Image (cartoon, helix red, strand yellow):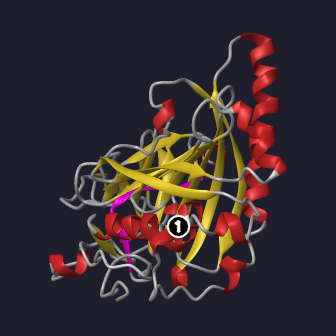
Amino acid sequence: MPTKLTHSTFNNPTQFIEGWYWTLPSKELKVGKVKPVTILGKNLAIYRGISGQVFAVDAYCPHMGAHLAEGKVDGDGIRCFFHNWKYDSNGICVDIPELGKPLPVCIKTWQTMEKYGLIWVWAGEEKPGLFPFVPELEQVDCDYVLGSRFIKNCHPNVLLINAIDAHHFNTVHNLPLEIVFQSKEIDPHAITFSNITRGGDDSWFVRLIRPLYQNEVTYSMCYWYGSTGTVTLGPDFLHFYIVFALRMIEGGKTEGQTILITPKRSGCLGWGINRGLLWLTEQVGNYFAKGDTQVFQTIQFDFKTPTKADRAILELVQNVNQQKALNWKTWEAVENVENSDRNYVQTSLIS
């Protein structure tokens, strides 16, 4: 009998996984500037202090509710435009000009990180987990550029499964290969999928590229917090690396940003080579994305009849449902969800 799908966080437009989420490009936030950002239903004010560090706070002043992005940066703190109350980098009120002294009030602050040319925020109350990385490049100094920014008419979880949908490589991309994915959890928040490919000997394209690979054709993914995915692919002598940073927007849809990465190479020649490699990486990503674009504008995901080829997808669903879920807009933990509901993936598949 087919796997039964019950209540879960996966593809749920009212919930998301506690984790790191991108907000805006670093270059858009200059020193001393503040911007309003709405992410996962919550309104934030994000500013860059005089030290150059980025801070994220709940948007509204606890005095009368003015939006702090209307205010101004003061040192590494921020002042509300309405009555000039100042909050320091920890969100503590340190100055009220009218009173000549502060009051014991504060605003909620959120951990930030600048990586890959983006400003990221940790959405969650617990200590931030590992920042997403490409497993092959964990200890490698890299060059990167931001690729395309896009909106898809489906949930981020659904968009992520595309890269591990083994059968669609045959039907959509016309690659006559049997692909089987092996999964491994490298962290409570991350799961990797590496491919084993078979067949394709009747394809001239497969015969052409086969000598470039000593073993299997390199194609692997790593998924973090059910929202950010990394893809590694290419011949043995040259791997391409793409990060898909996704976040849910209103209605359970997806706003995404691609990041193109390559190991840093020294000198002017290395810089020039990397510019070319990053451009080539973007073309590779565009090739695979092109065939699937329309599907994710019209799909109504309802996974009632998984087959044997869908095992990797079910493993990703289970991984997402085992992580800590937060409610849209409030960012409060989802309560009263039984373990049996989170771990809902059964082993039965359609052969």
Q: What residue did someone put label 1 on?
A: 161
Relative to 245, is 110 on the left or the right?
A: left
In this rendering, would 94 be left or right of 247? left
Relative to 166, does residue 127 appear above or below in the rendering? above
User: Between residues 116 and 63, which one lies in front from this camera angle?
Assistant: 116
Tell me if residue 70 can be seen: no
Query: Residue lying farthest top?
Result: 267
| Residue 37, x across and y down, in percent | 53, 64
Residue at figure coordinates x 64%, y 46% from the top left? 259
Q: How many marks?
A: 1
The quarter of the image holding the C terminus is bottom left
- The image quadrant where one finds the N terminus is bottom left
Magenta highlight on residue 21: yes
Residue 81 visible in the current orientation: yes
Q: Is residue 331 above or below residue 207?
A: below
Q: Quadrant of residue 61?
A: bottom left
Instruction: Give the secondary structure at mark 1.
Output: helix
Residue 33 position in % (x across, y down): 58, 48
* For residue 285, side relative to residue 324 (left or right): right
Magenta region includes residue 91: no
Residue 96 lies, in percent from the top left, at 32, 56
Magenta stretch, main secondary structure, is strand
Residue at 35%, 45% in the rendered image: 89
In the drawing, does residue 189 fall left or right of residue 13?
A: left
Type of the residue with mark 1: Ile
**Residue at image point 44% right, 45% down:** 132
- State which region is magenta: 15-24
| Residue closer to the observer: 325 or 36 | 325
